[in-house]
C-alpha cells in the first residue's frame, strides 16, 4: 500500500514539474499577455477545487408548514365505515413537531393518530373519521444545506 502511494505521489510530482516550470518562462506566453500565461500554467487542471462548508451549527428557526385536508366523512362505497385514514407527508418532516387538529380539537399522538415509518400519518380515531371537519396538520421540516 505504501509503495502504491509512493508511486502515485512520484507520478504526480513528475507530471506537475512539466506543468509548472519553476524559474523557467513558459514558451507559449508572450511577455505582455497575462491571460496566455494563465492558460499555459493551468492547462492540465481539469476542475477548480471549491471549499465546501461543513458546519454543524444549530438552526435557530426551522421552516414550519401547515396543511389543510378536506375529506368526505363516509366511505365512498357507503357500505362500511372507514377504519383509518392515511395522509402522506413531505420529505424531511420532523416527527416530534407534528400537530394534527380536527376542527377545534387537537389530536393526541399514539391514540388518535400514528406516525408510520413510510412517512405517513394514520388517523384511527373513529370520531374524527366520521366527522366532516377538515384535518389540519402543522409540522416543521429539516433545513437542507445547499453546497456551493
Image (spheres, grey):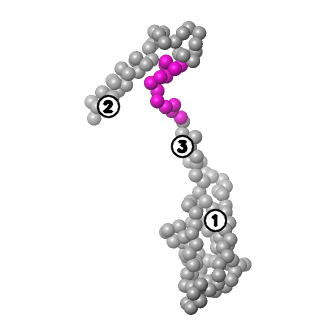
State the image coordinates of residue 52 (x, y, percent, origin top left). Answer: 54, 39
Residue 110 position (above or below residue 43): below
Q: Nearer the viewer, residue 112 or 123?
A: 123
Q: In which quarter of the image is residue 126?
A: bottom right
Taking depth in this image into account, of 1 and 90 the one nearest to the observer is: 90
The residue at which mark 3 appears reads as 54
Count the marks: how many? 3
Q: Does 72 lie within the magenta span?
A: no
For marks 3 and 1, give the one nearer the viewer: 1
**Is 62 in front, or is 18?**
18
- Residues at badges 3 and 2 in contact (C-beta under 8 Å)? no
Magenta range:
38-50
Figure quadrant of residue 94: bottom right
CA distance separating discs 3 and 1: 26 Å
State the residue position of label 1.
Answer: 139
Q: Helix, strand or loop at disc 1?
A: strand
Disc 3 element: loop
Instruction: Answer few, some or many: residues within 10 Å of disc 1's Cα (few below 14, many 20 plus, some between 14 and 19).
Output: many
Q: Can residue 29 be seen in this view?
A: yes
Which of the image's four quarters has the N terminus?
top left
Earlier in the chain: of badge 3 and badge 1, it is 3
**Pointer 3 local density, CA inside 10 Å: few below 14, some 14–19, many at least 20:** few
Residue 74 % position (x, y): 62, 86
| Circle 2 residue | 5
Residue 17, percent across and down?
Answer: 40, 17
Q: Is residue 127 visible?
A: no
Q: Out of 3 and 42, give the one closest to the viewer.
A: 42
Label 2 to label 1, Cα distance in Å? 50 Å
- Tell me which residue sits at (52%, 20%) in the image: 39
Residue in the picture at 58% in, 66% down: 89
Amino acid at each position: 500500500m505504501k509503495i502504491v502511494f509512493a508511486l502515485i505521489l512520484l507520478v504526480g510530482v513528475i507530471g506537475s514539474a512539466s506543468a509548472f516550470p519553476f524559474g523557467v518562462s513558459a514558451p507559449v506566453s508572450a511577455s505582455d499577455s497575462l491571460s496566455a500565461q494563465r492558460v499555459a500554467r493551468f492547462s492540465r487542471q481539469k476542475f477548480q477545487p471549491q471549499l465546501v462548508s461543513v458546519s454543524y451549527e444549530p438552526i435557530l428557526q426551522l421552516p414550519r408548514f401547515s396543511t389543510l385536508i378536506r375529506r368526505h366523512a363516509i366511505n365512498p362505497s357507503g357500505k362500511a365505515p372507514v377504519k383509518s385514514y392515511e395522509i402522506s407527508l413531505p420529505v424531511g418532516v420532523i416527527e416530534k413537531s407534528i400537530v394534527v387538529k380536527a376542527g377545534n380539537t387537537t389530536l393526541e399522538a399514539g391514540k388518535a393518530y400514528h406516525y408510520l415509518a413510510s412517512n405517513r400519518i394514520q388517523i384511527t380515531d373513529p370520531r374524527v373519521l366520521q366527522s366532516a371537519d377538515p384535518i389540519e396538520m402543522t409540522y416543521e421540516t429539516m433545513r437542507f444545506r445547499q453546497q456551493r
